[in-house]
Amino acid sequence: MQTLLLGPDDVAEHADLPAVIDAVESAFAADARGDTIMPAKSYIDLPKYNGDFRSMPAYVHAGEWDAAAVKWVNVHPDNPADHGLPTVLGTLIYSDPETAFPLAVMDGTVLTRLRTGAAAAVATDHLAVPDADSLGLVGAGTQSYTQLEAIASVRDVETVVIADRDAKKQQAFVDHFSDRFEVRAGSIEDAAGCDVLSTITPVESPIVDRSWLGERTHVNAIGADAAGKHEHDDRTLLDAKLVIDDYEQCTHSGEINVPWSEGVLSDGDIYGELGSIVAGEIPGREPEDGLTVFDSTGLAIQDVAAAHVAYQGAQIADEGTAFSLVGTETP
């Protein structure tokens, strides 16, 4: 038996985004049903290198398919300036849960962008107003591109406002999408007034004021993925129907982690987990709802779902590079 090697181009080609969104939604529902196994994300902090490693294993039984994987991923903010490398680099091992054979080793960086965008799309679909047609984005890095692509697949987005302190990144984003959307560079306040807002920054002090948000805006809080990170005004979190992806991760390292640790937020302020909404256990957006917030830390089950789509797509297309990774002879 051979293992399939899938590089970033392979993952981008075969992990069709609408299919990834569907798979991620199925993974959230499976998690709510108790059909997943997902140990807590583990961190290896490397202050010497201003970075960290994260290990993310999971198993998902989504009904029609089941799979297991582990992602080894980092965050090294100095990489672009000091080494000419991306801040985030990921590698994923995708395994057959029945035999434990490593079916694929694949790029986890593109995969992470896709599954993060997919999670925001699932949340937006369940929590944003049905006629949402404007999207604000804070942060013009690579994830912003996937956020727009994914959210535009669940809502008829017409107007896009991109905010970033780097004017070149803003303009690059505008240029990239100008033939598909009415897109313009603007301030954070401009972006916050849209029907849907995705924030994708690593800040540790809130940059989005509650007063800037529309009365029925849906917010995807994406940037906080480690303790101390915090993009949004505490009042926003207190006022909103607050939905999280995972209780343990969000209280430790999600958008709510700072006000949670300070006692500003408690269990009573959390509406529920996204999986419970997807599984139909609790309602998503209701007619009387105003502001909604999705706190996304990124779950290993999302990686498994995205990897499943990439692997199946490559198998059908008979692409990728097959190689011998482990010995399979038995005594």
Image (spheres, helix red, strand yellow):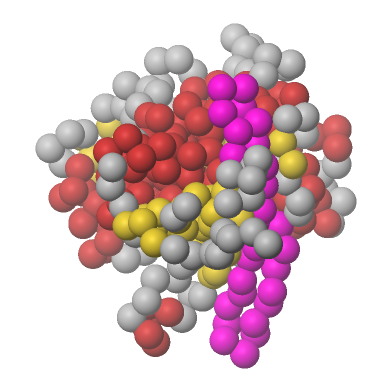
Q: Residue at x 72, y 63 (%)?
A: 42
Q: Toward which corner of the image does residue 168 lie, by quadrant? A: bottom left
In magenta stretch: residue 65: yes
Pinpoint residue 107: horizontal percent, then vertical percent.
Answer: 42, 59
Residue 97 shows up from this direction: yes
Q: Residue at x 65, y 25 (%)?
A: 29
- In the displayed structure, 277 sits above or below 74; it is above
Residue in the foreground of this view, choosing between 318 and 39: 318
Q: Residue at x 28, y 42 (%)?
A: 318
Dominant SS type (magenta): strand
Residue in the foreground of this view, choosing between 315 and 69: 315
Q: Toward which corner of the image does residue 184 lie, by quadrant? A: top left
How many badges with numbers are in the image? 0
In magenta stretch: residue 278: no
125 to the left or right of 159: right
Q: Toward which corner of the image does residue 97 lie, by quadrant? A: top right
Pinpoint residue 166: horizontal percent, then vertical percent.
Answer: 32, 65
Q: Residue at x 49, y 75 (%)?
A: 77
Query: Magenta stretch?
Result: 41-69
Residue 203 shows up from this direction: no
Pinpoint residue 174: horizontal percent, then vertical percent.
Answer: 21, 48
